[in-house]
Amino acid sequence: MLATPENAAEASAGPALVLLHGGGPGVDAVSNWASVRSRFDSEFRCLAPDLLGFGTRIAGTGGIEGPRAWAMARARQILNVLDRHGLDRVHLVGNSAAGGAAALALLSLAPGRIDRAVVMGGAGTGPLPPAVPFYDDPTKQSMRATLGRLVADESVHGELLDELADVRMRQALRPGAESAFRSMFADIEGGPPPIDLISIVNPVLALHGELDRVSPVEVSERLVDALPHGRLAVVAGAGHWIHVDRPDEFCKLVGEFLSA
């Protein structure tokens, strides 16, 4: 694996796979995909960029307002990444309201650049959250509680959640991170139109944890019903973080779908 998250791993000569992380406060690509990245690197040529508004990509994002505008801005960001690496066509795995929504936007914007896509946790197609997590109470305890909702059973992942709470606290409190995050979930009028899901021609697998406490399974059911070539897999015993709760099953489902 190379040093920076946007670089392609040289270990595999397999098909290219772009991993798009989720949208929690303080997230970055490295921490989001740590539980499964080495497995994907053995089968795919992986790219895992920090998405606009997170990690190393906070600066210069002023003026983007609302979830649809952020999704389209990130889709264009990924197109630029593909161009820089000379990649004509890739697979996508998009996590939740940041990566999943960006994946859907990219499928609508440039379907010819994508082969197959996996989206997780409803891909941001559900309602806006009733409250902004963490930033209304920016403490270590608040961050730990925010992360705890992402897994099915906090007691199983206590050490990981404590470690991630420290990492994400530091990143969530970087200059500009809070304003960017709040604008991602702002309920605004106007902006880009909603993604026309019916127009998406690529095969899409929607993964959803049976015990997801962030987004109910029904969100992915509605998403798949709207996609011409969508299918749904509900992962038993998993929460919103399917790749953390059930990494073996997650990698198996993704690998089989992308290799079909």
Image (tube, rainbow, N blue to C red):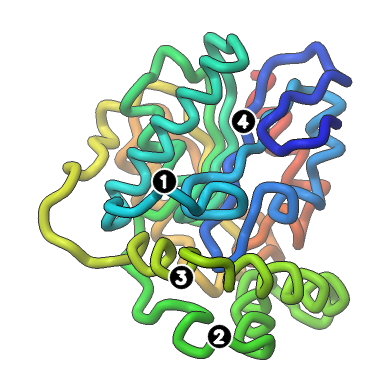
- Residue tagged 4: 18
- The answer to whether the residue labelled 3 contacts the one labelled 2, judged by CB atoms less than 8 Å apart, is yes
Q: Earlier in the sequence, mark 4 or mark 1?
A: 4
Report how far apart the C-alphas of labels 4 and 2 lie in the structure. Answer: 31 Å
- Residue tagged 1: 101
Q: In this view, does 185 lie to the left or right of 231?
A: left
Report how far apart the C-alphas of labels 3 and 2 lie in the structure. Answer: 10 Å
The kind of residue on which mark 4 rests is: Val
Report how far apart the C-alphas of labels 3 and 4 lie in the structure. Answer: 26 Å
- Residue tagged 3: 178
Report how far apart the C-alphas of labels 4 and 1 lie in the structure. Answer: 14 Å
**How many C-alpha atoms fall within 10 Å of the one at disc 1: few (<14), some, or many (≥20)?**
many
Q: Is residue 52 left or right of residue 187?
A: right
Q: Which of marks 2 and 1 is nearer the N terminus?
A: 1
Q: Quadrant of residue 71?
A: top left
Q: Which residue is rendered at x = 74% and y = 21% of the image? A: 45
Q: Which of marks 3 and 1 is in front?
A: 3
Q: Earlier in the sequence, mark 3 or mark 2?
A: 2
Question: Depth check: 201 or 14 in front?
Answer: 14
- The answer to whether the residue labelled 3 contacts the one labelled 1, judged by CB atoms less than 8 Å apart, is no
Q: At which x and y percent is residue 178? A: 46, 70
Report how far apart the C-alphas of labels 2 and 1 lie in the structure. Answer: 26 Å
Query: What kind of element bears circle 3?
Result: helix
**How many C-alpha atoms fall within 10 Å of the one at disc 2: few (<14), some, or many (≥20)?**
some
- Residue tagged 2: 138
Q: Quadrant of residue 42?
A: top right
Number of disc labels: 4
- The answer to whether the residue labelled 4 contacts the one labelled 2, judged by CB atoms less than 8 Å apart, is no
